[in-house]
Amino acid sequence: MPMCGRFARVSPPEVFAEMFHARLGNLEVGPRYNISPANDVLACRQLPAGRELTLLHWGLIPAWADDRKIGYRTVNARAETVAVKPSYRSAFKHRRCLIAADGFYEWKPDKVKKQPYYIRMKAGRPFALAGLWEHWEPQGGESIDSCTIIVTAANSLIGKIHDRMPVILSPNDYDQWLDPNERDTEKLMPLLKPFSESEMETFPVSLMINNPKHQGAELVNPL
């Protein structure tokens, strides 16, 4: 399982379009309680014509890749190396995005199993994960726009479950993160910090989350 390998996006796209000041277009997507790698995820990116909400394949495929299977290894990018690692450094400079989320899952080992936990904002509000995106055009095949989620050290709340967490961006940082003219690593790296534990909550959930086929709202019910 990747460091951030499952998350949920249940708020409607219209909510994220307003949050991100992005155009919605003709997207019609329902709630997803169990998003896993290789699924399409709802994301906001800055294009020359403005910000748009779109669907991106989860598992970044660099433009130079020979095979899309590299996406299975690029679901997450570590904050500490994202600016220099070949798979991510170009996207980090030029193609950053916001990935729409309402919560995510992590697993805590116990004596007999790994217990899944759901992690969300205390107020239940949706939020944005820091992501990167790429456009890939294979020879003789269909192009794919894909993405990765950046992960960082866990805050004290999530640290009781797992030592890593996805980067959650403050709304005050959306503009800087999406700005294609912002390429200063020293200004961008401070955004990739653990989110405040005081605004978050977590609770154990059913083992049904382990099966990607399960998608119902009951997945986020506390045990």
Image: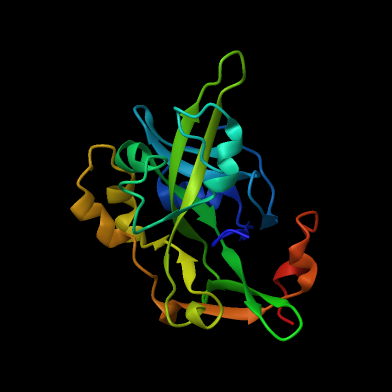
Name above or below for residue 96 compared with residue 168: above
Residue at (71% x, 80% y) in the render: 222
Compared with 200, 181 (above or below) is above
The colouring scheme, among rainbow, by chain, secondary structure or one colour, is: rainbow
45 with respect to 172 (left or right): right
Instruction: Pick the residue in front: 15 or 73.
Output: 73
Residue in view at x 58 percent, y 58 percent: 2
Which quadrant of the figure has residue 34? bottom right
Location of residue 179 in the rendering, given as x and y in whole percent from the top left corner = 28, 42
Kindly identify the residue that appears in the image at 66 percent across and 53 percent down.
Answer: 36
Q: Report the quarter where the C terminus lies.
A: bottom right
Residue 113, position in %: x, y?
A: 74, 78
Question: Quick one: which residue is furthest to the top in this view?
Answer: 140
| Residue 132 left/right relative to 113 | left
Seen in the picture, residue 221 relative to 128 is either above or below; the reply is below
Residue closest to the eye, 109 or 119: 109
Q: Which is nearer the eye, 189 or 13?
A: 189
